[in-house]
Image (cartoon, rainbow, N blue to C red):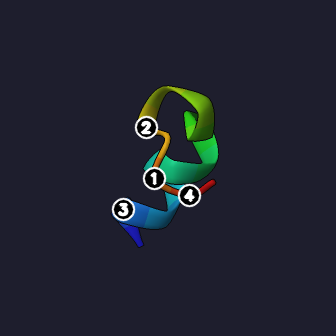
Amino acid sequence: MIKLVLVHKTPVTNGNSD
């Protein structure tokens, strides 16, 4: 749950979702 929120909150910053 926390991981999903983090990725959704900062997808560009993480660059992992994309």
Q: Tell me the crowding category of disc 3: few under 14, some 14 to 19, or many 20 or more residues within 10 angstroms, Cα based.
A: few
Residue at the left extreme, as displayed: 2
Q: Residue furthest top?
A: 13
Return the residue at label 4: 17
The foreground one among 4 and 16 is: 16
Helix, strand or loop status at disc 1: loop
For label 4, the SS is loop
Mark 1, residue position:
16
Q: CA distance from mark 2 to mark 4?
A: 7 Å
Q: Amino acid at mark 1?
A: Asn
What residue occupies the far bottom of the structure in this picture?
1
Labelled pair 2, 1 in contact (Cβ < 8 Å): yes
Where disc 3 sits, the SS reads: helix
Q: Is residue 11 left or right of residue 16?
A: right
Label pair 1/4, CB-CB below 8 angstroms: yes
Name the residue type under label 2.
Asn
Identify the residue under disc 3. 2
Q: CA distance from mark 1 to mark 3?
A: 15 Å
Q: Nearer the viewer, residue 13 or 9?
A: 13
Instruction: Give percent across and percent down for residue 11.
Output: 59, 41
Amino acid type for the residue under numbered disc 4: Ser
Judging by the rendered image, the residue that carries numbered circle 2 is: 14
Q: CA distance from mark 2 to mark 1?
A: 5 Å
Tell me if mark 2 has few (under 14), some (14-19) or many (20+) residues whose alpha carbon lies within 10 angstroms of its own.
few
Q: Position of residue 8 (x, y in %)?
A: 62, 50
